[in-house]
């Protein structure tokens, strides 16, 4: 599941100039508020340009909205127009969410991908996000219409409640419903997969964002979860490879990294590495050196791979339930079979990393 707090944090940079204007407009004149918000937007635009070498189109969109809102603030000076200003602000958000929900251009999704570094979302996550946008759209739309009605036909006290307190009540009801609904879905999910292995869902830095069962993680790319890979190299610079058991769910019968496995939910990378090494090749007295961390996407899953190397000359004991066969390969032999389908694509990718970091002479 998506972490809504992290999602809001990721979208905040695109909306910050507009939020600054709305706050400033409560304390200063519209003209000064426009200047403050535009100055803030220019600084944010400069910062993102220096960092990413391109203009942020969402901040530019914010500048246009600020000018529009500022013009409305200047024009709406009498009582009725003053009352309508909150409706105008909410109407702009309704437009953004409406375009996202009812047109092929999902502005909120674009902002999510923009500020979450092109994160990949699976179909379930996209559907969940769209449901949230749709719910927000209807809340904003209903509340906007209520503000307009109260501004024209009701007392100032009623308008003040509808434009202020009622907004939070509506949001409280909506998020309360969503919380109860999500809790029921979680309980149903846990019951359905109670006997399945669970993995932590992480970002590209390895920070845990949630958890999900193996079957869900392996239903397609999108749910990034950590795995550990250990390359075992002997004193002759030979690399030990395992032949994956034919019972394996992924790439059965292919030659692969000496040790590879998923990190169970709540388990550290180091704990998982030691467990997998003992389970697959029977070693415990080894010292692992971290080499790389990278994202690996396939048709089945999305992995955050933690790659390690250890130098080891003692006998290895393969686990026949995990591995069909295991042997040391010379670098020359590995190079000969690259691209033939005998090795896993994942190992071939990591072999290039090994060549560049440990076997530099092999590249010459």
Image (cartoon, rainbow, N blue to C red):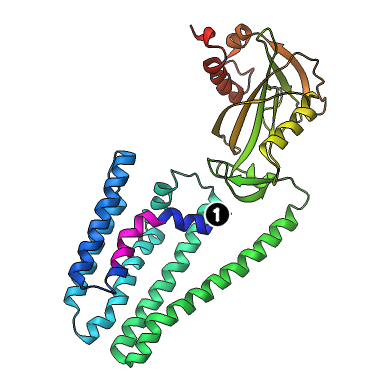
Q: Is residue 338 above or below residue 208?
A: above
Q: Is residue 86 above or below residue 359?
A: below
Viewer-side residue, 186 vs 16: 16
Q: Is residue 249 left or right of residue 154?
A: right
Viewer-side residue, 156 vs 50: 50
Q: What x and y, as percent, mark residue 318?
A: 80, 22
Q: What x and y, as percent, mark residue 52?
A: 33, 40
At horizontal 77% and vertical 18% (from top left) the residue drawn is 325
Q: Is residue 190 left or right of residue 143?
A: right
Q: Does residue 22 appear in this view?
A: yes
The residue stretch that appears in magenta: 12-21
Residue 14 in magenta? Answer: yes
Viewer-side residue, 314 vs 68: 314
Q: Is residue 39 above or below residue 140?
A: above
Q: Is residue 276 above or below residue 106?
A: above
At horizontal 24% and vertical 62% (from top left) the residue drawn is 36
> Which residue is the extreme one toward the bottom?
155
Local crowd size for mark 1, using a 10 Å CA cut-off: few (<14), some (14–19), many (≥20): some
Q: What x and y, as percent, mark residue 338?
A: 57, 14
Q: Is residue 211 left or right of residue 359?
A: right
Q: Which SS class for mark 1?
A: loop
Majority SS type along the magenta span: helix
Q: Name the quadrant containing residue 178.
A: bottom right
Q: Name the quadrant containing residue 146.
A: bottom left
Q: Does residue 322 appear in this view?
A: no
Residue marked by disc 1: 2
Q: Name the quadrant containing residue 186.
A: bottom right
Q: Is residue 287 left or right of residue 126?
A: right
Task: Please state, as top left, top right, bottom left or bottom right, where the N terminus lies in the image.
Answer: bottom right
Number of numbered markers: 1
Q: What x and y, as percent, mark residue 97?
A: 38, 63
């Amino acid at each position: 599941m998506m972490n809504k707090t992290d999602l809001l944090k990721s979208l905040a940079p695109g909306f910050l100039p507009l939020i600054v204007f709305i706050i400033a407009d409560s304390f200063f004149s519209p003209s000064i508020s426009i200047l403050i918000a535009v100055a803030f937007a220019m600084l944010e635009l400069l910062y993102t340009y220096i960092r990413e070498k391109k203009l942020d189109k969402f901040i530019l969109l914010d500048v246009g909205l600020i000018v529009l809102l500022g013009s409305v603030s200047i024009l709406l000076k009498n009582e009725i127009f003053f009352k309508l200003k909150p409706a105008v602000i909410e109407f702009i958000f309704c437009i953004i969410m409406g375009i996202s929900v009812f047109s092929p251009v999902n502005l909120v999704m674009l902002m999510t991908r923009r500020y979450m570094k092109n994160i990949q979302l699976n179909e379930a996550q996209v559907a969940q996000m769209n449901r949230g946008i749709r719910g927000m759209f209807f809340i904003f739309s209903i509340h906007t219409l209520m503000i307009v009605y109260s501004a024209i036909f009701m007392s100032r006290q009623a308008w003040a409640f509808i434009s202020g307190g009622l907004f939070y009540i509506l949001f409280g009801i909506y998020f309360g419903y969503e919380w109860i609904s999500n809790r029921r879905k979680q309980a149903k999910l846990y019951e359905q997969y109670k006997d399945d292995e669970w993995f932590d869902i992480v970002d590209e830095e390895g920070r845990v964002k949630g958890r999900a069962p193996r079957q869900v993680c392996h239903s397609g790319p999108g749910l990034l979860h950590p795995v550990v890979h250990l390359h075992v190299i002997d004193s002759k610079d030979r690399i030990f490879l395992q032949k994956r058991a034919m019972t394996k769910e992924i790439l059965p019968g292919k030659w692969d990294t000496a040790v590879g496995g998923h990190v169970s939910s709540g388990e550290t990378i180091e704990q998982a590495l030691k467990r997998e090494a003992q389970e697959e090749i029977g070693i415990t007295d080894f010292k692992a050196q971290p080499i790389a961390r990278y994202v690996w996407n396939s048709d089945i899953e999305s992995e955050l791979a933690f790659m390690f190397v250890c130098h080891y000359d003692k006998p290895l004991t393969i686990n026949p339930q995990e591995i069909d066969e295991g042997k040391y390969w010379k670098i020359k032999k590995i190079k000969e079979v690259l691209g033939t389908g005998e090795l896993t694509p994942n190992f071939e990718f990591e072999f290039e990393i090994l060549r560049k970091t440990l076997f530099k002479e092999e590249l010459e």
